[in-house]
Every structure is written in C-alpha cells, then in structure tokens.
C-alpha cells in the first residue's frame, strides 16, 4: 500500500471522527439546553471548549502518528526523500561521466 495513501486514509478517518464527535456534541448541548440544564451561552461555551481541546489532542495524535510512520519506514529501510534526491543527483553525475567517457572513446 502506498504510504501517502495510508496517511491520507488515517487523516480522513481523523477528520470524519472529529466531524461525528462535533455533531454529537451539538446534539448533546442542544438537549441540555432543551432540558433547561444549560442556557444557550453556557452550551456554546462548553461546546467550543471541548472542540478546542479535541483539536489540540488531534494535532498531538497526528504528530505522534507521523513520528510512528517515519520510524516504521526507517525500520523497514525506506529511504527519506532527501536521501532519494541525493542518490538521484549522484546517479545523474555518474551517467554524465559515463557519457563523457563514451564520447571520448568514439572521437
């Protein structure tokens, strides 16, 4: 499976979960207002506070997930992008040197 695809799926899962939790939170606060346990201002503040906390935790989760994926890829021996770029540069230089040597032989 493509690593970017896996990361995108995990990110979409997180977004979907956040959206579902936000909807349930709105339903719960609406019910608390309807039952007279909270006034609309308190419900809005509660919902905003909980969503801020959830966003903060989601950011931490995403950072942890990225670290874990990087560690797994490193353990599997998957090179990083900068390593691949360096290898491509070295390969380009070697190909150029071979071409130059071939041209010298045919002159």
Image (cartoon, grey):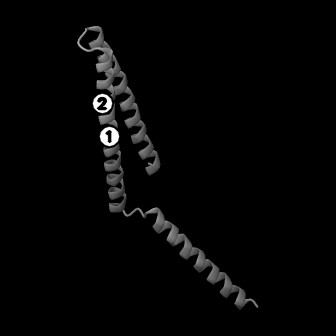
Q: Residue at x 36, y 51 (%)?
A: 66
Q: How busy is the neighbourhood of tag 1: few (under 14 within 10 Å), some, or many (20 plus)?
A: few
- Residue 12 in picture, x, y percent from top left: 43, 37
Is residue 58 in sight in this rendering? yes
Q: Secondary structure at mark 1?
A: helix
Between residues 68 and 23, which one lies in front from this camera angle?
A: 23
Please name the residue that numbered disc 2 is placed on: 49
Residue that sits furthest to the top in the current view: 35
Asked whether the residues under the numbered discs 1 and 2 touch, taking CB atoms below 8 Å apart as contact, a structural biologist would say: no
Quadrant of the image occupied by residue 18: top left
Comparing 77 with 40, the one in front is: 40
Could you say where residue 55 lies in the image, as x and y percent from the top left? 34, 37
Residue at image location 35% in from the left, 43% down from the top = 59
**Residue at the image position 33 percent from the left and 17 percent from the top:** 27
**Residue 74, horizontal then vertical, whole percent:** 35, 62
Asked whether residue 2 is in view, the answer is no
Q: Quadrant of residue 29?
A: top left
Mark 2 neighbour class, 10 Å CA radius: few under 14, some 14 to 19, many 20 or more: few
Left or right: 82 with respect to 46? right
Sequence-first tag of 1 and 2: 2
Figure check: 36 above or below 17 = above
Residue 58 rendering spot, x and y as whole percentages? 33, 40
User: Which is closer to the viewer, label 1 or label 2?
Assistant: 2
Q: Is residue 50 above or below residue 76?
A: above
Alpha-carbon span between mark 1 and mark 2: 11 Å
Farthest-out residue, right: 107
Q: Identify the residue under disc 1.
A: 56
Left or right: 20, with 32 as reference point: right
Q: Is residue 1 above or below residue 43?
A: below
Residue 17 placement: quadrant: top left
**Where's the C terminus, which quadrant?**
bottom right
- Secondary structure beneath dot 2 equals helix
């Amino acid at each position: 499976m493509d690593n970017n695809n896996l990361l995108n799926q995990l990110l979409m899962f997180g977004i979907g979960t956040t959206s579902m939790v936000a909807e349930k939170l709105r339903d719960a606060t609406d019910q608390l207002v309807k039952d007279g346990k909270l006034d609309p201002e308190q419900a809005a503040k509660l919902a905003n506070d909980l969503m801020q906390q959830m966003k903060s935790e989601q950011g931490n989760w995403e950072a942890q997930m990225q670290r874990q994926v990087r560690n797994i890829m490193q353990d599997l021996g998957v090179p990083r992008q900068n390593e691949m770029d360096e290898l491509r540069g070295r390969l380009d230089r070697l190909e150029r040197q071979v071409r130059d040597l071939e041209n010298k032989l045919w002159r």
